[in-house]
Amino acid sequence: MSYVRLPPGHQDPTEYIESLSKFLAKFQWLSSIHAYDSLTEDFWNKSWPSEWRALADEAYFESEQLIGLVKDGTVQDSWPQSLKDYIHACKELSLPRSVLQSEFPEKVFDGIDSCIDEAATTASGMSRKKLHEVERFARVILDFASTAARDSIVNNETVKIVDVGAGQGYLTHRVSTEYPCVAVDFDQIQTVGSVSRGANIKKGKLKDVRGVGNVPAVAVNLRKEVLYRTIHINSEKLTELVKELNAEQMDLKDGKATDFMLVGLHACGDLSSIAMLKTFEAVESVKLMAVVPCCFNLLTEPESLDDSCFTGAHGFPASKSVFSAMQRHQLLLGHKSRNLSCQNFDRFDAAGIESNLTGHYKRSLLDALLWHFNLDPPSKDGTTVPEPSDAEPRERKQHKFRLGKLPIEAFEGSFIAYAQAALQRLGLGNRVGEAELQAFVSLPQYVNAKRQIFVVHCIKSLLSRVLESLVLMDRYLGITEMNSEGGLLERAGVRVDVRMLNLFDIYESPRNVVFLARKQRKEAE
């Protein structure tokens, strides 16, 4: 049976999607403003609700209250009712993200804390965050595969795990303790790193698994084979690869077909959507899929909501139900909203939040400064944008350049120090003097800029989890819709079940949702 844990008050995924789409359409004016455009586009005066502006008044402003809002959800009694309603709706509509061990098979996480400590990070060559992700995900993958074998969905003797976007092979080599694997990546450097990691594990230089209780760790010489493939990963290439692997295995095993399981740990953008979902649906030998998606800002999205645009060629939306809800509410996320879906303050403490917000303020004011003095950073080839004539007004995209690394003093000091370092970095150090910078920051429209940026970004950040909830529910419904009448799987007499679960501690790993999907012949149900 398919399963997803919805927020309290929501029982039906379709109704929940409708509520999400309606709310996000209402506040698209907020989710679609880029962090660095808010000053150059006069967002505060043109778009920000007038009754919310008092939060940035000097006599009223409290950065601690805003930080308390994003960190702990603390709402002040003195805030406008419309703002309180918005904050309440953001909380009510966001998917629950806590881990419930009861949603996973019994004992799958037994002894896991002893496998994720300082000694383990050193021995495994992984950061604490990466070890937390790999150990938890590997245990779930291995249990998912063995359970499918007990349920006669796969043959345990012929299961092969395909790690999509395998990178340095942290997950690949961990699950090779029980099943043969194929590490797939688009970057040869990553593949070389994975090969090297496998060699170091065999030599005993790295140790990525410990025994639990009285059960010893799997001996290195008993690990299964790992194959490596470097390809440009899209749905066509991945489907092709799996079919080729299946043909190779049938030749080696006297005609016995292989049962494949696709896995992906933080598979980026369309990789965890179009590529993996289409391969899972289209290739008969792919029986299982376990994927933790991330980088929703890299998803492709149609440019309009016309029926003809829902072709399956985009990473979002993958679900017809979600696309229909977006049509009803005229909601297109766009890159800026999708980017926001990946940005929140969950892993920050209060000092980290304040530092982050100060960085936003300085970077936003830098854009305004470049605009004010009519400056453009040189392009990569060293040229600058030609000066426009009076008849051709300048059209700018100020945040389309990378500032690069600045000295620590630039962040710890005033905006003047930051601007001087940034201008020097951009090759514009001799274009604006200190007196001009002082005059710029004293302009009426920028005197209150820091407080405005703090208010805008704290309140905007609450939309992050709501946007992410829509993207995650789209993925869930996209998989369940593989069961649609007349569809490829329905014609083949196959049904898909999917479970969407919170796998990682959200404070360790904010993209913490895993999708576990398996095919089953209908007569076997």
Image (tube, rainbow, N blue to C red):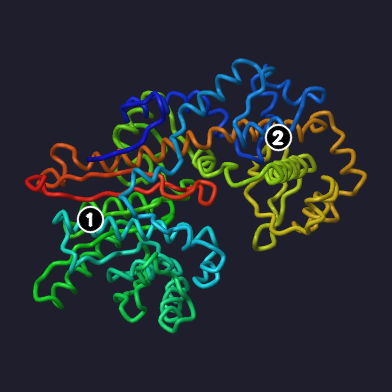
**Taking 290 as reference, is 85 above or below it?**
above
Q: Nearer the viewer, mark 1 or mark 2?
A: 1
Q: Quadrant of the C terminus?
A: top left
Q: Residue placed at 17% from the left, 57% from the top? A: 150
Q: Hey, what amino acid is under mark 2?
A: Phe
Q: Hey, what amino acid is under mark 1?
A: Thr
Q: Secondary structure at mark 1?
A: helix
Q: Is residue 55 left or right of residue 250?
A: right
Report which quarter residue 217 is drawn in: bottom left
Q: Nearer the viewer, residue 514 or 397?
A: 514
Report which quarter residue 246 is drawn in: bottom left
Q: Quadrant of the N terminus?
A: top left
Numbered mark located on residue 454 in the image: 2
Query: Looking at the image, can residue 388 be seen?
Result: no
| Residue 466, image x, y percentages | 48, 33
Q: Residue placed at 69% from the left, 43% from the top? A: 360
Q: Residue placed at 6% from the left, 46% from the top? A: 523
* Mark 2 surroundings within 10 Å by alpha-carbon count, few (fewer than 14), some (14 through 19), many (20 or more): many
Q: Which residue of the protein is positioned furthest toward the right in this rendering?
A: 435
